[in-house]
């Protein structure tokens, strides 16, 4: 009863408190489209809490504007714990998958990395913050063009993009310290193995299209010998082969 009397005396303060409570708690996206808080939450709850410890990866994920890599309709969902459609039947991977693959590659500021499946360009942007250079190939031309535009707009200068069939890798810039494949293949494409440096690592989802696949980490030994390790189960869009184009 005492509390009710208090409310009666100060109705304006009470109303302000209610407004503050709901605006602070319900949405972590700021009024001016500032996603900083959403990004911090994503890194803490989806990535650090799930065991990703690599500082460079955590910093990269905290600074790359994921919302700039999705279509306008999905911006507010950009930091959610799931993949999102990017058109043409393709998806931008779930943030945790981007993080674990980036950590597995074990790259640093000296590394040159090849990515197969540019998609939105987000994974390339994350790697560009950790590595020296990123080369990324996309088979779907409109996605290649859109991702290139986004990466230019955001000022990434150490990423080179190509519209081609990534099955063949990018021999002009090989060998690479690390290769990341973000579409699933039934087998590891031999040209990619050839273009991996001795001592290098490749992370690739292996398995049938639209079914559960294995995320495999491939290590190429100093003498070219391969060892593989299954990391977890994943579900990626398939590596397609029907729009092949020659290297530019
Ligand atoms: N790394 C992306 C996720 C892309 S989804 C991101 O951060 O958004 C996988 C992408 O691989 C799709 O865009 C698809 O078009 C592309 N892809 C499929 N087969 C390919 C191939 N043979 N060569 C290059 N890209 C391919």
Image (cartoon, rainbow, N blue to C red):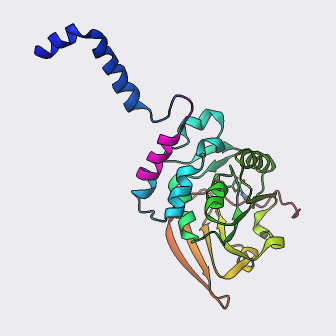
Q: Residue furthest bottom?
A: 223
Instruction: Report whether residue 183 is seen.
Output: no
Residue 40 part of the magenta-drawn span: yes
| Front one among 122 and 20 | 20
Magenta part of the protein: which range? 32-45
Q: Position of residue 197 (x, y in %)?
A: 70, 80
| Front one among 134 and 118 | 134
| Front one among 179 and 166 | 179
Q: Main secondary structure of the magenta part?
A: helix
Which residue is painted at 56% across and 56% down in the image?
Answer: 60
Q: Quadrant of the N terminus?
A: top left
Q: Position of residue 132 (x, y in %)?
A: 68, 66
Q: Quadrant for ligand 1?
A: bottom right
Quadrant of the rendered image containing residue 17: top left
Q: Quadrant of the C terminus?
A: bottom right
Residue 142 part of the magenta-drawn span: no
Which residue is painted at 67% across and 91% down in the image?
Answer: 223
Q: Position of residue 196 (x, y in %)?
A: 70, 77
Q: Is residue 234 above or below residue 119?
A: below
Apparent side of residue 116 relative to residue 58 in the rendered image (left or right): right
Q: Residue furthest left?
A: 1
Quadrant of the rendered image containing residue 244: bottom right
Instruction: Report whether residue 239 is seen.
Output: yes
Q: Is residue 178 above or below residue 156?
A: below
Which residue is painted at 56% across and 50% down in the image?
Answer: 63
| Front one among 168 and 10 | 10
Q: Position of residue 148 (x, y in %)?
A: 77, 50
Apparent side of residue 52 relative to residue 227 in the rendered image (left or right): left
């Amino acid at each position: 009863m005492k509390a009710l009397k208090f409310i009666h005396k100060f109705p304006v303060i009470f109303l302000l408190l209610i407004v503050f409570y709901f605006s602070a708690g319900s949405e972590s996206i700021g009024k001016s489209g500032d996603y900083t808080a959403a990004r911090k939450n994503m890194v803490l709850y989806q990535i650090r809490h799930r065991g990703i410890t690599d500082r460079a990866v955590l910093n990269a994920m905290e600074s790359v504007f994921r919302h700039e890599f999705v279509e306008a309709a999905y911006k507010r969902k950009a930091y959610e714990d799931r993949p999102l459609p990017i058109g043409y039947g393709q998806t931008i991977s779930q943030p945790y998958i981007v993080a674990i693959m980036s950590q597995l590659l074990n790259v640093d500021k000296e590394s040159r990395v090849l990515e197969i499946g540019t998609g939105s360009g987000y994974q390339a942007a994350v790697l560009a913050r950790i590595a020296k250079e990123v080369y990324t190939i996309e088979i779907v031309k409109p996605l290649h063009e859109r991702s290139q535009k986004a990466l230019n707009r955001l000022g990434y200068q150490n990423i080179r993009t190509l519209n081609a069939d990534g099955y063949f890798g990018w021999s002009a810039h090989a060998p690479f310290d690390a290769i990341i494949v973000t579409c699933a293949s039934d087998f590891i494409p031999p040209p990619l193995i050839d273009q991996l440096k001795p001592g290098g690592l490749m992370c690739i989802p292996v398995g049938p299209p639209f079914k559960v696949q294995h995320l495999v980490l491939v290590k190429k030994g100093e003498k070219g010998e391969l060892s593989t390790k299954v990391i977890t189960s994943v579900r990626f869009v398939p590596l397609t082969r029907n729009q092949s184009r020659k290297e530019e």
